Amino acid sequence: MIKVVHYINQFYGGIGGEEKADVKPEVREGVIGPGMALKAALGNDAQIVATVICGDSYFNENLEEATAEILQMVKAYEPDLFIAGPAFNAGRYGVACGSICKAVKESLNIPVVSGMYPENPGVDMFKKDFHIVETANAATGMRQAIPTIAKLGLKLAKGETLGAPAEEGYIPRGVRKNIFKDERGSKRAVNMLVAKLKGEAFSTEYAMPDFDRVAPNPPVLDLKNARIALVTSGGIVPKGNPDRIEASSASKYGKYDIEGVMDLTEETYETAHGGYDPVYANQDSDRVLPVDVLRDLEKEGVIGKLHRYFYTTVGNGTSVANAKKFASTFSQELVKDGVQAVILTST
């Protein structure tokens, strides 16, 4: 019987939603939440002996401590297989699943598997470290994800040879292997080319990366009369982070009024970002969001006016889907407010 330990977050553990995202790690005997479906999919080959639960915010804000604590919980059960999630497109959950899977694999030397939507930041961070099953964007895809995760997990635990990503359902890891085919490469390449020219379906053996290219806007010709806005993924917020923007895998952005603000001081602003050393940004947030310099340019007549509001979020682990959603929302506000140009700062 294969012993399995399952990792889930506070929501799937039945503890609560975002208001409980700061709960510390705990372990419970047996099956909880999506573990019920996982248990059925594993069948008689495996048993879920324990479920580890941890809040998404707690894990991401206490990465080393949480990883070490959870690792000890998992180790105590001497499992043969570790399964995390699935996390779908929940960024902080995906990062937590990826982090603990990597730690378990490296420290306990047992197979691990998780499930995520391809745009979850956890995929890019950890797909080379272990197998991640491709899932739908949201939990509505649970019924399709669980059987694939279970099947792949059992194969790994039994030491069986895995097929290609498309065959097994996991996201390509960027690992290439030499294999033998009945036809030589030149003939297969010509066959693919002919199929492409005919408009027929074909599958490349060497997939190339697909980059999202954005055409630049035309230059602003009259800066002296232009309204310029500031947007940042560096996490600059008013002191105290009033909207509780997450330090990692942000699910929200903030809009803040800087009318009359000439300088971002240590007493009034700080960074909520968890992906870089915050010391210098907290001492002078103008280093990330240059309000002081824009005010100087405003006085000198180089620009017409600095826009009254700035928009901010945290780029650390934030999913592409969330980033696009944020931008599509506040960009409409910027256009409506007559902004001609945006200066986007990072870290």
Image (cartoon, rainbow, N blue to C red):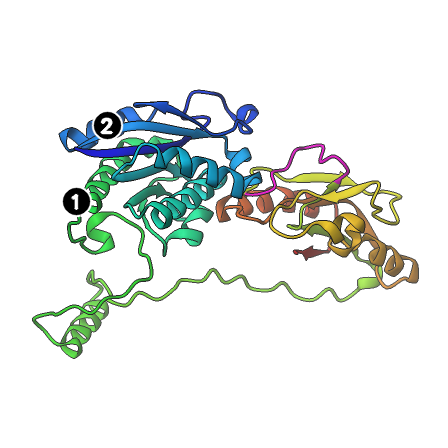
Residue with the most extreme right position: 299
Q: Amino acid at mark 1?
A: Lys
Who's the residue at 63% across and 37% down the image?
245
Task: Kindly indicate whether the residue at mark 2 contacts the one at mark 1 (C-beta within 8 angstroms).
Answer: no
Is residue 241 rendered magenta in the image?
A: yes
* Residue 303 position within the rendered picture, expressed as x and y whole percent measured from the top left: 83, 60
Residue 255 appears in the rendering: yes
Residues at marks 1 and 2, CA–CA distance in whole angstroms: 17 Å
Mark 2 burial class by Cα count in 10 Å: few <14, some 14-19, many 20+? many
Above or below, comparing residue 124 to residue 193 in the picture: above
Q: Which residues lie in the magenta part? A: 238-248
- Which disc, if any, is residue 39? 2
Depth check, front residue: 110 or 226? 110
- Which disc, if any, is residue 56? none
Q: Amino acid at mark 2?
A: Lys
Q: Read off the residue under disc 1.
A: 158
* Residue 328 position within the rendered picture, expressed as x and y whole percent measured from the top left: 58, 45
Label 2 secondary element: helix
Q: Is residue 226 left or right of residue 157?
A: right
Who's the residue at 33% across and 45% down the image?
108
Above or below, comparing residue 244 to residue 120 in the picture: above
Magenta span: chief secondary structure:
loop
Label 1 secondary element: helix
Who's the residue at 20% across and 27% down the image?
40
* Residue 167 position within the rendered picture, expressed as x and y whole percent measured from the top left: 19, 51
